[in-house]
Image (cartoon, grey):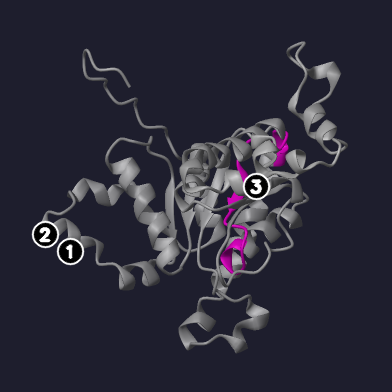
Amino acid sequence: MTRENRRHPLRDAIEDRQAVQVTPDTPQTRASAYQLAFTDNDFMLREELRPVRLQLELLKPQMMLDEEGIQSTIVLFGGARIPSPENKASARTETLADLSRFYEETREFSRLMTLKSMESGGAEDVIVTGGGPGVMEAGNLGALDAGGRSIGLNIVLPFEQAPNEYVTPELCFNFHYFAIRKMHFLMRAKAICVFPGGFGTMDELFESLTLIQTGRMEPLPFLLFGTDFWKKIINWEALADAGTISAEDLNLFKFVETAEDAMAEIAKWERAPARQKVPGRST
C-alpha cells in the first residue's frame, strides 16, 4: 500500500511497523506485551487466535488471486506419487509405473486448456493444482509449456518438499488448514479433473462430489481420468445398488482417458438449470 492508493487519511499499519523498529531500546519496549499485535508472531500463533488465522488463510489467496485477475479455474486433483515417463523405472510398484501415462495426459490437458485460456486473455480457465510433485507437477508444467500461468495451492506437510518449479511464483500459495485449501480449489472452479491418486485425491474427489450431490455447489464438468483405475478402486454401481446413493448420482461425473477426451467433454458441457429456491428461505 502507498499513500497514493490509501483509502483513508489515517496513519497505516505499515508506517507503524516501520516506526517501532527505531523505538528506543528499553525494558518496556523489549517486552512482548509492547509488540504490535499484528507483528507479534508468538501472539498470532496462540490457540485462541485460530479463528483469525483461518480468516487470514482464506483472505490472502483470495485477495492476491483477485489482484492477479484470476476469474475462473480448471481444477486438477491427482497423486503426488505418479512418476513422469522418464522416471517410471524407479516407481515403487508396477502399477505406478503403468500410471505414468497419466503424467503425460495431465501435462497435455493442461497445455491445451491453457492455450484456450490465453485466447481470451488468460483470466478464465486457469489451471490450479496442489503445487506438489506427480500429477500436480505435470499440470503446472503443461501450463508453462503453453506459455501461460498456473496456480499452486501447497500445504505444509512433515515430509513435503518445496512446491514444484513450474508453478507461477506469484500464484503459489502455502496453507496450514486443509479445509481452507479445499475451499480455494473450488471457489473459482469451472471444471474438476481427477487423475489417479491416493487418500488425498480421494478426499478431494468425494468432498467435491458431495457438495454437488447435496446442492452446495453448482454442477460442473467432473471428469475422472482412467476408467479402469477408478472402476477397480471404487465400485460405483454397488453404491447405487445398495441405495446409499441414487442411480442419478452416477451422472455427476464422467470417465475419460485422454486430454482430448476431457477437452471435448468440457466444450460440450451445458450449464444445468438453476436450482429452485424454497419459498421464504434465504440462501
Q: For the residues labelled 1 and 2, say whether their Cβ atoms are less than 8 Å apart.
A: yes
Judge whether 31 appears above or below 129 on screen.
above
Q: Secondary structure at mark 1?
A: helix
Amino acid on which the number 2 mark rests in the picture: Ala
Give 227 or 4, whichever is nearer the viewer.
4
Q: Are marks 1 and 3 in contact (CB under 8 Å)?
A: no
Is residue 240 rendered to the left or right of residue 196? Answer: left
Element carrying mark 3: helix
Bounds of the magenta segment: 118-136
Q: Which residue is denoted by mark 3 in the rendering?
A: 41
Residue 121 is covered by the magenta coloring: yes
Which disc, if any, is residue 238? 1
Q: 69 above or below 255?
A: above
Q: Is residue 48 magenta?
A: no
Judged left or right of residue 214, residue 165 is right
- Residue located beneath label 2 in the image: 242
Q: Is residue 236 visible?
A: yes
Q: Position of residue 128 (x, y in %)?
A: 59, 49
| Cα distance between the residues tagged 2 and 3 | 52 Å
Which residue type carries mark 3? Asn
Question: Is the Cβ of the residue at disc 2 closer than 8 Å to that at disc 3?
Answer: no
